[in-house]
């Protein structure tokens, strides 16, 4: 198959790369096409290493903690994207290689990104997009995804010149939502992040995104036209119908010990919800193992990642550890906050109701206070909505 070093060299022309991509899209690929795709993926290694070093050096001078990790796009994900986007050329796919940066808050995110943009004369590598083009915080995706992406072209006098890399920025809150979507996609065997799967599950994640955006970051997401009351009621209704919180809590939190080595391969076993991991002292050794695993386990979720510390890797790629605790905690905290924002106009005569525990409120008390035959009560502590009278 050739050495790992050869695999990291873009020996094929872009025309040949695009032909291989078209063959994969049409389901007509052969062994040579597979070899071309593999070499094209691994040719981005030098670009990844350069950008990760650059980003880490800048992060050391920034305020607050920034988690940085890198990854190669999985072969199965590349093929899926080619099939979802018929006009996409493999040579122009801009997220085959990526660096992910996770910030404590949006202020830190935008400050770091602005400093990176302002350093472009010294950076040498070219930013390919307008600043707002992939800003999914200012313009959230319809599915609820929030974050910011930039695409850079590797500008160097080498065989890697012109290769593209994606730099992805998220806050911890945005990252908790995105990884919860991936975890649920793993265990349901559906690509939820690509809009495939149970409609109600996709919808509850949209409501969850809105809850997190409003309560933790004072922003709006994909359901910005709805009131706080409507967001809580919509989330609660879907949660009740599909048992969303129970689905999340039933996921096994894998307590795998993460090696302190920087180069790791992670494989998530869907059916058994188990994590397999391999760690390596060098990139070439990791890539050799990745080739072997992908050949023996077609269709499995396998990813090669790098991070300075084991804990950074766990944070940046927590979807591979089925770790939804942070998301669960945040979503129900946020729901409680939205509930407490209801005004008297939202809840009729809420302010005139006596202060008492939920079980103490009788239908007679509610009807007397509101003059209505139906009432949906939300506890001041954010407890579940209760209907004391049928509408």
Image: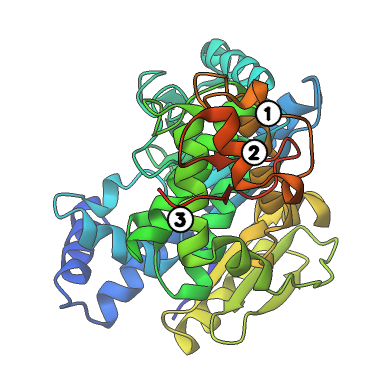
Q: Is residue 132 left or right of residue 251?
A: left
Kindly indicate whether the residue at mark 2 contacts the one at mark 1 (C-beta within 8 angstroms): yes
Q: Which residue is mark 3?
A: 238
Location of residue 177 in the rendering, given as x and y in whole percent from the top left corner: 57, 47
Can residue 168 be seen at all in this image of the molecule? no
Q: Residue at x 62, y 14 (%)?
A: 115
- The CA distance from mark 3 to mark 1 is 28 Å
Kindly indicate whether the residue at mark 1 contacts the one at mark 3 (C-beta within 8 angstroms): no
- The CA distance from mark 3 to mark 2 is 28 Å
Location of residue 319 in the rendering, given as x and y in whole percent from the top left corner: 62, 60
Q: Which residue is mark 2?
A: 365
Q: Is residue 380 left or right of residue 370?
A: right
- The CA distance from mark 1 to mark 2 is 8 Å
Q: Quadrant of residue 215?
A: top right
Q: Which residue is mark 1?
A: 353
Give the label, 3 or 2, closer to the camera: 2
Q: Nearer the viewer, residue 66 or 218?
A: 218
Circle 3: element type? helix
Circle 1: element type? loop
């Amino acid at each position: 198959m050739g050495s790992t070093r050869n695999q990291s060299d873009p020996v094929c022309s872009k025309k040949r790369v695009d032909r291989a991509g078209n063959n994969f899209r049409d389901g007509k690929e052969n062994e040579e096409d597979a070899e071309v795709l593999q070499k094209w993926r691994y040719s981005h290694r030098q670009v990844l290493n350069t950008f990760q070093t650059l980003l880490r050096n800048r992060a050391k001078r920034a305020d607050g903690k920034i988690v940085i990790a890198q990854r190669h796009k999985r072969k199965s994900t590349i093929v899926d994207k080619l099939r979802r986007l018929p006009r996409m050329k493999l040579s122009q796919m801009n997220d085959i290689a990526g660096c992910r940066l996770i910030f404590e808050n949006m202020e830190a995110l935008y400050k770091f990104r602005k400093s990176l943009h302002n350093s472009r004369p010294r950076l040498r590598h070219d930013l390919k997009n307008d600043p707002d083009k992939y800003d999914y915080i200012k313009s959230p995706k319809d599915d609820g995804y929030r974050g910011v992406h930039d695409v850079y072209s590797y500008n160097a006098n080498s065989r890697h010149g012109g290769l593209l890399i994606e730099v992805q920025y998220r806050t911890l809150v945005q990252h908790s939502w995105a990884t919860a979507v991936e975890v649920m996609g793993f265990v349901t065997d559906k690509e939820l992040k690509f809009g495939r799967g149970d409609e109600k599950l996709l919808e509850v994640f949209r409501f969850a995104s809105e809850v997190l955006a409003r309560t933790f970051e004072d922003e709006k997401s994909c359901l910005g036209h709805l009131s706080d009351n409507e967001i809580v009621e919509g989330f609660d209704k879907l949660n009740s119908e599909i048992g969303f919180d129970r689905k999340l809590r039933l996921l096994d939190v894998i307590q795998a010990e993460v090696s302190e080595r920087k180069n790791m391969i992670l494989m998530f076993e869907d059916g058994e919800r188990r994590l397999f991991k391999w760690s390596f002292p060098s990139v070439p050794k990791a890539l050799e193992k990745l080739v072997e695993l992908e050949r023996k386990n077609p269709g499995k979720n396998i990813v090669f990642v790098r991070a300075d510390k084991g804990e950074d890797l766990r944070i940046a790629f927590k979807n591979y550890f089925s770790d939804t605790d942070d998301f669960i905690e945040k979503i129900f905290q946020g729901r409680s906050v939205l509930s407490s924002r209801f005004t008297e106009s939202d809840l009729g005569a809420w302010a005139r109701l006596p202060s008492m525990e939920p079980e103490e409120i009788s239908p007679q008390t509610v009807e007397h206070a509101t003059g209505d035959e139906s009432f949906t009560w939300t506890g001041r502590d954010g407890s579940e909505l209760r209907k004391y009278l049928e509408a």
